Image (spheres, coloured by chain):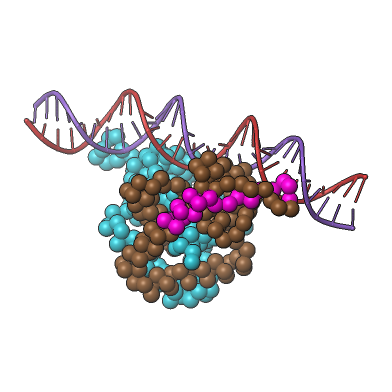
Chain colours: A brown, B cyan, C purple, D red
Amino acid sequence: MEPVPMLLAMTYRAMGDQFHDRLKQIGLEPLRPAHGYVFRFLKEKRATTVDIGQHLGVTKQAAAKIVNELDEWGYVLREPHPTDKRAQYVTLTTKGRDYLKFADNLWSDLEGEMAEAIGADVLATIRQGLAGYLRHVHGEDQPGLRPVW
Amino acid sequence: MEPVPMLLAMTYRAMGDQFHDRLKQIGLEPLRPAHGYVFRFLKEKRATTVDIGQHLGVTKQAAAKIVNELDEWGYVLREPHPTDKRAQYVTLTTKGRDYLKFADNLWSDLEGEMAEAIGADVLATIRQGLAGYLRHVHGEDQPGLRPVW
DNA sequence: CCAAAGTAGTCAACCAAGTTGTCCAAGCCT
DNA sequence: AGGCTTGGACAACTTGGTTGACTACTTTGG
């Protein structure tokens, strides 16, 4: 029997590949997964580069590189932290929010197809099961999102 | 709502981290995921370096590096291909099979804990759901195992 | 049957995405 | 005040892959 992590890795890759292919097909420049996860993170909370690194599970230097790219490409900008003169908040530009909105739609499509393939109830169970496991191993503190290969 | 791939990545990482930690705790040298996947692949079928690369989703050169490591460490050895003088079969040594057996037990333990945390039926559903999705997108041909970050 | 095309493996150069280490300026804490 | 900590930036390096080229062998099609 195949171990679960293998299934997780394969499914992660399969979905990611589909997402990537369709983005390219449509003509939108396909960023890496990490970029998308940053968008999603920034939609929820104001965050510094350090926060982003923590969330992704990489060092602050690696996070800084990603933020630099997103800045150059016009998806985010840095604004001064109101109270801490060292820190900068990274915030989404309109272009960034648009990209995220578009990507979210595409994800819904893909999940819809997945639901059709395996059953909406099964998909819901997967969702809740994985979330439950994550809550079980780490309490409430985020684990670091990046899969280590 | 969090997109499914994010849950997959986080769970993959969480399980991998636990596996890694316990291996180290016990004193067994913790190889990288790819090495373990090679073991498992070799248990099932005789394979060349090219086959392994295909299975992992990397180039044959990258696969060759991994095989070299495993060879140096004594987990596999190369034997001549019976009919094709260019090719070599990579096969597990006793040390390799022992490692795999040990790792499999550890995985069972972890999956047992997962089942306890979220319910054995839920875990079974996850298993079948993901496998079903993979069958749906790629027919029978393997997709490449490596998650691309 | 033989020539052309394809394939397994290896070597080497390169690249991307991370790491560690160091530093400064600013904040925090008694 | 003073000492420890932290956000951010710069640089050097490591890792795990890639592409490209080449040899020896195999397969295929005229």
The residue depicted at 59 percent of the width and 55 percent of the height is: A55
- Residue B123 rendering spot, x and y as whole percentages: 44, 71
The residue depicted at 52 percent of the width and 66 percent of the height is: B110
Q: In terms of depth relative to the viewer, which is nearer, C21 or B34?
A: C21
Q: In terms of depth relative to the viewer, which is nearer, A93 or B95?
A: A93
Q: In terms of depth relative to the viewer, which is nearer, B16 or A65?
A: A65
Residue lying farthest to the front in this orientation: A94
User: So how many labels did they put on this image?
Assistant: 0
- Residue A142 rendering spot, x and y as whole percentages: 60, 61
Magenta highlight on residue A107: no
Whether residue B144 is visible here, answered yes or no, is no
As drawn, is A38 to the left or to the right of A61? Answer: left
- Residue A68 rendering spot, x and y as whole percentages: 56, 42
As drawn, is A12 to the left or to the right of D30? Answer: right
The residue depicted at 62 percent of the width and 54 percent of the height is: A47
Q: Quadrant of the N terminus of chain A?
A: bottom left
Q: In the rendered structure, which segment of residues is drawn in magenta?
A: A84-103
The residue depicted at 52 percent of the width and 71 percent of the height is: A132
Position above or below: C13 against C20: above
- Residue A41 rendering spot, x and y as whole percentages: 55, 57
Whether residue A19 is visible here, answered yes or no, is yes
As drawn, is B52 to the left or to the right of A61? Answer: left
Position above or below: B94 against B110: above
Magenta highlight on residue A85: yes
Q: In terms of depth relative to the viewer, which is nearer, B103 or A111?
A: A111
